[in-house]
Image (cartoon, rainbow, N blue to C red):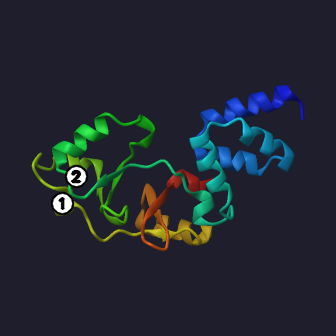
Amino acid sequence: AHVFEVDKLQKLGGGMDSEDAADLLGHLPDELSQQVLSGLNKDDLQEVEELMSYPEDSAGGLMSSEFLTINEALTVRESIEMIQTMDEDLISFYIYVVNDSSRLVGVLSLKQLLLSRPQDVLSEIMSTDVISVDLSTDQNEVAKVVEKYDFLSLPVIDENRSLVGVITVDDVID
């Protein structure tokens, strides 16, 4: 491949969500995708390589590794202050609540958070009945869950119930 193409692809890959970059690189010839990967910064490279390691038709292959988690011990006020300092891309309709071990323990909507009292602790106001899929869940199963519950996004967990990614409804429609 031409150096010019690799340079353009590196810029493109660097500016995309990691899930989209992984999809793009998965469709390129191996040699070219390796050249593009070699030009990404360390954090992007790690994310993209990890996403590329999951089968494309599994939850792991569909998910984004960019999502918003907040520790269950924080208050509503602390959570809102934290969200205000975050990268806009991370902010979505749902907030996934984790414990100190990064295990997914609850979920709440941004609306719920904003309508709660500032001193409320997340563990008291979150819903603990979290519907999630694991990394190996087939994409058809993922689509059924999204459709059944009418979710905008769905958390993906590993074998330890640690949150590893989020699948948005548009990832499923694609």
Q: Which residue is situated farthest in the front direction here?
A: 42
Residue 131 in the figure: left or right of residue 65: left
The numbered disc on residue 112 is: 2
User: Which residue is depicted at the point 45% across and 56% down?
Assistant: 153
- Whichever of labels 1 and 2 marks the residue nearer the N terminus, that label is 2
User: Which residue is depicted at the point 28% across and 48% down?
Assistant: 110
Q: Nearer the viewer, mark 1 or mark 2?
A: 1
Q: Which residue is situated farthest in the right direction here?
A: 1
Residue 15 in view: yes
Q: Amino acid at mark 1?
A: Ile
Number of other residues with Cα within 10 Å of mark 2, as a class: few under 14, some 14 to 19, many 20 or more: some
Q: Position of residue 26 (x, y in %)?
A: 75, 51
Q: Position of residue 139 (x, y in %)?
A: 61, 67
User: Which residue is depicted at the point 18% across and 60% down?
Assistant: 125
- Front-most of 37 and 136? 37
Q: Amino acid at mark 2?
A: Gln
Q: Which residue is situated farthest in the top direction here?
A: 4
Give the quadrant of residue 61. bottom right
For label 1, the residue is 125
Helix, strand or loop for disc 2: helix
Give the quadrant of residue 79. top left
Number of other residues with Cα within 10 Å of mark 1, as a class: few under 14, some 14 to 19, many 20 or more: some
* CA–CA distance in space, label 1 to label 2: 8 Å
Quadrant in which the N terminus appears = top right
Q: Please, is residue 13 above or below residue 71 in the view? A: above
Q: Position of residue 126 (x, y in %)?
A: 23, 61
Give the quadrant of residue 7. top right
Residue 78 in the figure: left or right of residue 24: left
Q: Please, is residue 128 above or below residue 110 in the view? A: below
Callout 1–callout 2 Cβ contact below 8 Å: yes
User: Which residue is depicted at the point 61% across and 37% down?
Assistant: 16
Residue 100 in the figure: left or right of residue 51: left
